[in-house]
Image: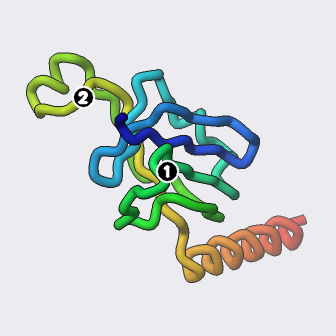
Amino acid sequence: MAKTFTVTLSDGTQLTELELNGNNFVSTSEITAGTFDGKLRHVAISCSDENFSDRYGLVGEHDNMELINLQHYDAEQAAKYGIKEGWYFVLRELTPEEIYKISTDARISYLEMITEA
């Protein structure tokens, strides 16, 4: 039985029956960047195989993730590259430093906005 993955986004949206190619999740169902918009604050990733060797640290609970790549490969492209046809996407967790910078930038923008009056 093939290993499949489920990615549950923070709003409860579940992307199911995903396969893994390297660190790319692969879906046979269409996925767009909008699928992830505002839904990566908390993400749960599970695998159908409890003995999965998780060298990328994918399986588990993750906070503050970002979509770093989303690519669709049609049948022709998939054949050219020797991969499965589908939508490939990669998520990663933001580092504490990146979260701090985002927070600081938001505070500065807010202060600029309220002092422009």
Q: Is residue 71 above or below residue 74?
A: below
Asked whether, in this view, residue 70 is left or right of residue 102, the answer is left
Looking at the figure, which quarter contains the C terminus?
Answer: bottom right
Looking at the figure, which quarter contains the N terminus?
Answer: top left
* Residue 27 visible (yes or no): yes
Q: Position of residue 28 (x, y in %)?
A: 40, 23
Q: Amino acid at mark 1?
A: Leu
What numbered label is drawn on residue 84? 2
* Residue 88 visible (yes or no): no
Q: Nearer the viewer, residue 52 or 5?
A: 52
Tell me how many marks there are: 2
**Can you tell which quarter of the image residue 13 is in?**
top right
Q: Nearer the viewer, residue 50 or 37?
A: 50
Task: Give the class, few, some or many, for how many residues have Cα within 10 Å of label 1's Cα (few <14, many ≥20).
Answer: some
Residue sitting at 63 percent across and 42 percent down? Answer: 37
At mark 2, the secondary structure is loop
Q: How is the image coloured?
A: rainbow
Q: Nearer the viewer, residue 39 or 115?
A: 39
The residue lying furthest to the top in this view is: 75
Dot in front, 1 or 2: 2
Q: Position of residue 40 (x, y in %)?
A: 64, 52
Q: Which residue is mark 1?
A: 67
Q: Is residue 10 above or below residue 70?
A: below
Q: Amino acid at mark 2?
A: Lys
**Can you tell which quarter of the image residue 103 is in?**
bottom right
Asked whether, in this view, residue 21 is left or right of residue 12, the answer is left
Residue sitting at 56 percent across and 75 percent down? Answer: 98
Q: Position of residue 46 (x, y in %)?
A: 55, 50
Who comes first in sequence, dot 1 or dot 2? 1
